[in-house]
Structures are given as C-alpha cells and as structure tokens.
Image (tube, helix red, strand yellow):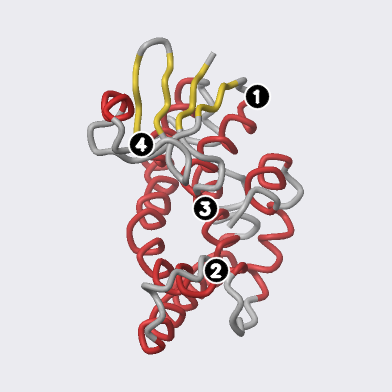
Amino acid sequence: MLKVHGYAGSINMRKVLWTCMELGLPFERIDWGGGTRPVTDPEFQKLNPVGMIPVLEDAGQLFWESNSIVRYLAGREGRDDLLPADPAKRAQVEKWMDWQVSDFNNTWRYVFQATVRRNPNFQDEKQIAASWSAFCSAAQVIDRELARTGAYITGPAFTCADIVIGLSVHRWKSIPLEHPHLREIGRYYDRLCEREGFRVYGRDGGL
C-alpha cells in the first residue's frame, strides 16, 4: 500500500490525496509537519533531504514535490485522460501545473498568512493589498482561460492540471476579502464540487 507522509491540512498534501482518490488507490497517511512531528526530525530527513512534505513511499521508492507525485501516480496507473502520453497534449497539462506551483502560489502566500492563518508576522497592510491584487490577477488569468477552453483548464476534460489549479482556486475563495466577480471560476468551482475527491480534499479538506 502507498504511504503518504505529511499533514492533512497542507494544500500540497491534499493534491496527492485527491489524486489517490481519483485513481482509486488506497493509502496510509503518516503525520509529519503542521504541528505534528517536525520535518526537521532526522527520521523525516531520511525520507526527503530538503525537509518538505508531502513524501510518497511506493514499494520502497521515495517521491517528493507534490506536482511530481501527482504526475507519477497518474502515469503509474496509465491514466492518459489525466496526464496524456502524447508529448504535445501532456505539455498542455504540465504547463498549468508548473505555473500553479511557481507563479500562482507565489501570489497568495502573504495575504493567506495574514487573513486566514492570522500570522502576526504577515500584517503589513501594503503587502497584504499587493498580495491580494496579484492573487486576483492570477485568478483572472484562469477565468479568461476557462472562458476560452470550456469546462476545465485545458479543455472539456478533467486532468491533473485541475487538481493543482482547483486547490489554489479553493484557496482564493477562502480569502476573507472582497472578490471580483469571476463567472467562469464560479462555474468551474461548482464542477469541481461534483467530484468526490475535491469535496473531501478541497472544499471540505481545509484551506
């Protein structure tokens, strides 16, 4: 059985757990980080030398970096619908996954820590405003793309890109500030809520 190391509230952990549910893969979750056992523990460092969650353990092999794990699991199960084998089609999925983990994630860190986590180290009003503006601008990119492509981020079919983008959209919706009206994102979120994996690990799984 797969072992997934990390705490359930982590957005990156939830990418992997949602993927497991989409694929029908049983797993054992082992707590690390998030107020449980610290990732600085030498035992965890043996799992991941960079000390970050999640870590996937599969038949003695260790995998880390959440989007890489999502790709690995879809490929392991031969799910070309989620991650196409054709290089050009696969790149259409992976470009959004890469953008999510780099550009998109970097927009929301400050405003999320300030308004949701209420971290006292993230209370500079100008930085909150700048982070929220950048987060909304990134959400508008997604809204425009959905208007062009249809139901999901790369077209009419759900893919791995929607797992990672969808969780960031959920985080955008969680920010307790005034949101611009983005019709396509609203429809997209409703479609994601039809999937059990998103209901469990997105909508109801934490922020």
Q: Which mark is residue 154?
A: 3
Q: CA distance from mark 4 to mark 3?
A: 14 Å
Q: Amino acid type of disc 2?
A: Val
Q: CA distance from mark 4 to mark 1?
A: 25 Å
Q: Amino acid type of disc 3?
A: Thr
Horizontally, is 60 left or right of 190 in the view?
A: left
Query: Residue 107: which quarter of the image?
Result: bottom left
Nearest to the observer: residue 185 or residue 116: 116
Q: Earlier in the sequence, mark 4 or mark 2?
A: 4
Q: Amino acid type of disc 4?
A: Pro
Query: Residue 85: which quarter of the image?
Result: top left
Within 10 Å of disc 2 (Cα), the crowding (few <14, some 14-19, many 20+) is few
Q: Measuring 51% from the left and 36% from the top, which residue is drawn there?
A: 16
Residue matched to label 1:
24
Nearest to the observer: residue 120 or residue 64: 120
Q: Earlier in the sequence, mark 4 or mark 3?
A: 4
Q: Residue 104, relative to residue 126: is it above or below?
A: above
Q: Measuring 39% from the left and 31% from the top, which residue is drawn there?
A: 55
Q: Which mark is residue 61?
A: none
Q: Measuring 73% from the left and 40% from the top, which residue is drawn there?
A: 196
Q: Give SS at disc 1.
A: loop
Residue 177 x %, y %: 59, 81
Q: Residue furthest left?
A: 49
Within 10 Å of disc 3 (Cα), the crowding (few <14, some 14-19, many 20+) is many
Q: Nearer the viewer, mark 1 or mark 2?
A: 2
Residue matched to label 2:
116
Q: Earlier in the sequence, mark 4 or mark 1?
A: 1
Residue 23 x %, y %: 61, 27
Q: Earlier in the sequence, mark 2 or mark 3?
A: 2
Q: CA distance from mark 2 to mark 3?
A: 30 Å
Q: Residue 137, relative to residue 125: is it above or below?
A: above
